[in-house]
Image: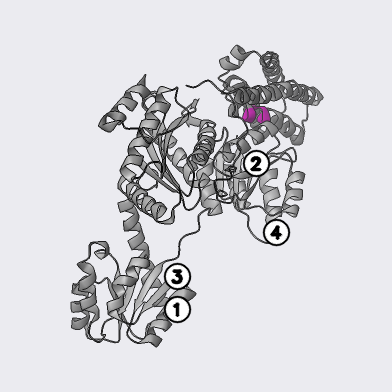
Amino acid sequence: MTPPSDTFKARKARLRSAFLTQLPQRISEARLGLAALPDTPVEPEALTGLALVFHTIKGSSASFGLTAISDLARQAEDALRHALTVGDPLSAQLRATLGRTLDQLAAMGARPAEDTDAADRFGFEPLPAAAEPALAHAGHATQRRAKRIYLCDDDGDLGQQLCTQLACFGYQVTALSSLADLRAAVAAEAPAAVIMDVMFPEGEHAGPAALADLHETLGYVVPSLFISSRDDFQARLQAVKAGGSAYCTKPVKTTEMVEFLDALTNRESPTPFHVLVVDDEPNIAQLHAMVLEEAGMTTTIATDPAAVIDLLKGFNADLVLMDMYMPQCSGPELARVLRQMPGHISLPIIYVSSETDRDRQFKALEVGADGFLTKPVEPARLVNEVSLRAERMRTLHALMVRDGLTGLFNHNTIMQFLEIGVANARRDHRPLCFAMIDVDRFKRVNDAYGHPAGDHVLMALSRGLRLRLRECDVVGRYGGEEFAVVLPGVEVEDGKVILDQLRTSFAEVLFYAGDATFRCTFSAGIAAFPHITSADALIEAADVALYCAKGNGRDRVEIASADDRFGSQAPIARERADEQ
């Protein structure tokens, strides 16, 4: 693994120092709270407050990988929770146990922050430098707009860590350390989503209660995700009752949280269905088009069947809605024409006709149509029939052109996009970059942590690429752990800046495999048009540059030259270099 940069080390030292510096104060609070408790009776609020101190230590240390500290704090919290549940007084034995636990925690916290070996013995993973979510280079358009997310947790170190991790996936997150801060932030700007702890100093279910109040104040439900060291039914139930949409236990798996946030904030609005309406009667065609457009679809109209083929070239139709009887060319005849064209073999076709004879309807369907609606068609039924079949078409199309694991375009599709991109760049006299990306030492990840962990890495990288690039950029899975990116209108030096920012962010993502945590890096090679003039040559040159990046130490981006050629042995040589 490439050694961390000076910035990375500084960030690691600062966060570790902050946590260890605060630990003695938290231990002192626990000692004072324990000493203040009477022998009997003990008020539940007092035990709850003491349990909260241990809870905070447990959650923070677990998230930082300090398992020894976390386990001790967890044992103390569990003992206090048990005393609260059964209603027993604070026994002398429990007091003594808590006292010993605090002594052990104090001994661990007394190790100097700069003692790297001590931190490593606790299993501490270095924390990343703050990520810059924006692609700042002037040669690249602004990334997809980040949505405001509020993260409310009274553990400031954990909050900052999660903000840093989420920034790697393009989320703009504001860390807030108290419920009062959350209320003030919401009053200033309503968020797209809220992430918050369950427990706060105000109470063990203060988070859900605050969220419920927030919903009442706003008058609508904000998408929300709860994080907590608690995994019991009551904590989850209170989160659901407050309107929580998702729940993650600490230590939080960032990629799991990102999946929830992607779903909650609808980062990518669905593309409207595209419907071609074919009817020789303009008024009927307009009527059906209006109904579909009112439902949010995009339509175009053909009143002459002879114009359909040309219209389909410039209109990416999800479905054709056509009349059955038209002069010179009937609906079934037009359907046969389309079915003889490779690009339209599976295009859904629905007839709309006043024909009521079932035999004629059936014969019309035999030529490859997908449905039959009798005029006049109720608007609701027209919309439903079109939506169902168009959605099915998109699903089938996605299975053909997208990779099943990552959801990115598959190998053949990304290569087609590159060909189209080069042709457009040549026509418009604009630059274009093509990049090959490969996860470093991916075989070792699979061997050490298992193939599910490897799949998790690939999904995280694909999501990061998709969310951090522009809408016009095209990302695909080239094969295995390799990805390909097409950047239209981007000069090669700007493209390198973009890839370096993506590379740095990806290296900061923390992955989990059971009790283990790890990070990954990637290497990339980038080639540019018009310095390299064809799609095949761009692929070959980017592949050679990727091989050079592997040979020069990995976790880097190399630019190809027009003379770069490596032939069919490039993938084999690169794989050998990556295993060394």
> In the rendered image, which quarter is residue 570 located in?
top left
> In the rendered image, which quarter is residue 276 located in?
bottom left
Callout 2 touching callout 3 (CB < 8 Å): no
Name the residue that disc number 4 marks: 218
Residue at position x 53%, y 53% in the image? 267
Labels 2 and 1: the sequence-earlier one: 2
Q: Where is residue 87 in the image (x, y as percent from the top left)?
A: 68, 33
- Front residue of 66 and 78: 66
Name the residue that disc number 1 marks: 291
Label 3 SS:
loop
Q: Position of residue 335 (x, y in %)?
A: 23, 73
The amino acid sitting under disc 2 is: Val
Alpha-carbon span between mark 2 and mark 1: 47 Å
Name the residue that disc number 2 marks: 198
Name the residue that disc number 3 marks: 297
Please identify the dominant SS of the magenta region: helix
The amino acid sitting under disc 4 is: Leu
Residue at position x 68%, y 56% in the image? 215
Residue at position x 70%, y 14% in the image? 110
- Front residue of 24 and 329: 329
Q: Which of marks 2 and 3 is in front?
A: 3
Label 4 SS:
helix
384 sits to left or right of 132: left
> What residue range appears in magenta?
55-60
